[in-house]
Image (spheres, grey):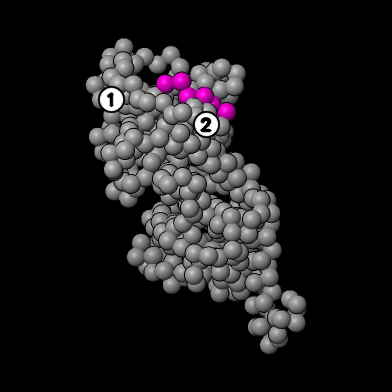
Amino acid sequence: MTTENLDKVTVKQLLTFIPDQSVSALAAKTGVDYQAKVLFGRSMFYLLLYGLAENERTSLRSLEDTFNSRRFKLLFNLDPGQTTRYNSISDRLATMNLDFFEESYKMIYSLFHEHFKPKETLKYNITRVDSTMVTETASKLEKGMTTGIKKDGKKQIKYTISLDGLLPSSVKVFTEQAELSEDKTIPKAILALVDTHKDNVFVFDRGVQNRQAYVDLDEKELRFVTRVRTNSRSKVIEELLLPVNRKVGNLTILKDEWVYLYGSKNKRVDVPFRLITTKDEQDKLILFVTNMKEDTDKELIPVQDIIMIYKQRWDIEVFFRFIKQELNFSHFLSTNLNGIKIILYMTLILAMLIHIYKKHNNVGYKTAKRRVKMELEELLTIIIVEACGGNPDIVLR
């Protein structure tokens, strides 16, 4: 299927990019079915994908009902005689080989990225990086971090996700208290992509303030754009020429400088960065920092481009809201760390499918989720009618 000029896509078309033979091959490669009697890797893969898509609020009991339904087994060609209980699903999530789900996620991301890579509004390949937290009662979580001084008996797990256009290209899970700071987690997530995203521009928010993090990214030749606090100290090396039109959206460009930044204890960082000072309509200062100065032709990268790159960061905030509101990501289906990561990978696979459907059919997130569910039901209807020797065209005119 050619997708370059494809205006609309169907769920059936998208499911062809999740090759069943490859899923089965990964199950064999990772040994995920070792000692399994009912909940095999392939079965769990489709149970979680279908269960997350079908249910408004997925739970272990709803997954039990889904697995035990003949409709589900018919759709994914599973043994109709097998049944399970919710506690068996919970136990399986806690012990299954995580590699199977991680490799499945990476494979499907690569296939979707190859065929549905979106065109950025700017000429740069932009990767947005940010974190979100999910909270649970402390006694239920094996690991987690606490925030603030309030002792409310709850812990949080942190997810740091990289988003390339429509698709989440990587994810890391953090549970240790020392990893609460974005200074530790976001640079770590970016540096893990050095071999695959070398030509991208990474954009992240001002939660990362450690100047050494900027240096580490620059040393790896990874381009980035972020913000710094208005009281950040710097020493000017060179003043860059401002454009004739200094308005970019609601911002006015005041300065464009090549500087040395100062870090903790007023220690100067002897690696130069570009500091852009702007103000909004309320005269509030907004400062951007980047290591992008010149392009491959040694031409100065327009200051407007730097500001517009940062504005693309908002896409990941929208993505987080989508997976939390529409895909049940605001609560834990499993409170075991292995199970949490399995659900995470399956949620991101489903998110890619729905996100692409939304984009190519020009609908909102809620509509995309609802129509994906409806089209799955139609696929099932076709299979049932054909299995009974009938003509599905008569039913679905």
What residue does disc 2 label? 248
Tell me, yes or no, whether the two marked residues, 1 and 2, touch with CB atoms within 8 Å. Answer: no
| Mark drawn on residue 272 | 1
Q: Secondary structure at mark 2?
A: strand
> Is any atom of residue 293 visible in this view?
yes
Real-space Cα separation, disc 1 to disc 2, in angstroms = 24 Å
- Three-letter amino acid code at the position of disc 1: Pro
- Three-letter amino acid code at the position of disc 2: Val
Of 250 and 48, nearer the camera is 250
Q: Is residue 274 depicted above or below 388 in this figure? A: above
Of 136 and 221, nearer the camera is 221
Of 274 and 323, nearer the camera is 274
Q: Which residues are magenta?
A: 250-255
**First in sequence: mark 1 vs mark 2:** 2
Main secondary structure of the magenta stretch: strand
The image position of residue 260, as x and y in percent, is: 29, 20
10 Å neighbourhood of mark 2: few (<14), some, or many (≥20)? some
Tell me what residue is drawn at x 60 percent, y 45 percent.
322
